[in-house]
Amino acid sequence: MKYKTVKPFVKWAGGKSQLLNDIRAKYPEKIDKYCEPFVGGGAVLLDVLANCRPKEVLINDINAELANTYAQIKNSVDELIEMLSEMQKTFWEKNDTDRKIMYLAKRERFNDLKVNGDEQINLEKAALFIFLNKTCFNGLYRVNRKGLFNVPIGSYKKPPICDAENLRLISGLLKNVQIKCGDYSKCADFIDENTFVYIDPPYRPLTATASFTSYSENEFGDKQQIELGKFVDEISAKGAKVLISNSDPKNSDESDSFFDDLYSSYTIMRVSAKRMINSKATGRGSVNELLICNC
């Protein structure tokens, strides 16, 4: 089968575009019902939507700004494109000093809406979310303890802030997709024996100092990984087909068998991936990642 490739609308830590061939090899023969409890940048979602055409789809993410952006692309793509087009035109025309001033103003506005906004400004918030993702340092999404986005500006000459064609394509694919925001357990009632579930949680840090970046205000440590393992057992018992991604602790410690033990009753594969988002260029080499499945 020749697959169509759809580009995610944001750069996202742990994005799965480079692992799609390995992930596709684990797709069921037919996908009628699909669920992603941690949708993130949506590389696998868009691949499934474009190539497998499931009839029922539920996606979820705990990051409220990301979930809102999916909803705005789905429901208000033309208005979103209009906003982004204007931002792109203005940003491209500025010199470096004025770009930084514009960036900081947009970041402050985004944080104000994030904390104090209401549903009336969700469209503007989505446009700012994409603008910041395309213009910030290395495409990071990071928040401080107060939940405020705090990434500095990047150094791109002509960042693609408004990719109208791709946004319209994604909007069409999302038309029948149900979008939720919250804990992954919200997906439990949707999942049954006919569902293919792809689970891509926050990765377990490879070293004690590797968790410098927070993508939401919510911690996801070993305790949460173990709770997720129980959730996987529960939906597997329903008959759902499940595929999980995570980091491989053995990259930094050969004796660390955390996931091998947690998912000992599942099939565990190690695949090579490049770290595309890291604060240091030296931290962007190839590492093994885990693909864990019951199918």
Image (cartoon, helix red, strand yellow):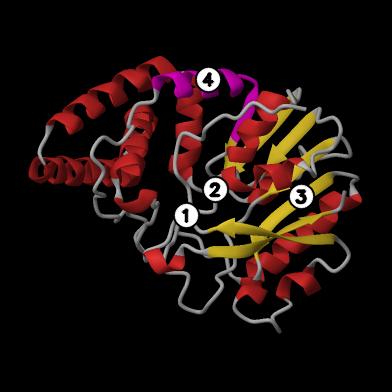
- Mark-to-mark CA distance, 4 and 3: 26 Å
Q: Is residue 43 found inside the magenta-colored segment of the image?
A: no
Farthest-out residue, bottom: 255
Residue 131: quadrant of the picture: top left
Separation (CA) of disc 4 from disc 2: 19 Å
Q: Earlier in the sequence, mark 1 or mark 3?
A: 3
Q: Closer to the camera: disc 1 or disc 2?
A: 1
Mark 3 against mark 2, which lies toward the viewer? 2
Residue 134, image quadrant = top left
Which residue, given by chain and number where applicable, does mark 4 sit on? 169
Bin the neighbour count of mark 4 within 10 Å (Cα to Cα): few under 14, some 14-19, many 20 and up. Answer: some
- Looking at the rendered image, the quarter that the N terminus falls into is top right
In the drawing, what numbered circle is on residue 243?
Answer: 3
Instruction: Report the disc number at residue 276.
Output: 1
- What residue would you read off at disc 2? 15
Residue at point 18% right, 47% down?
104
Contact flag, marks 4 and 3 (Cβ < 8 Å): no
Dots 1, 2 in contact, CB < 8 A? yes
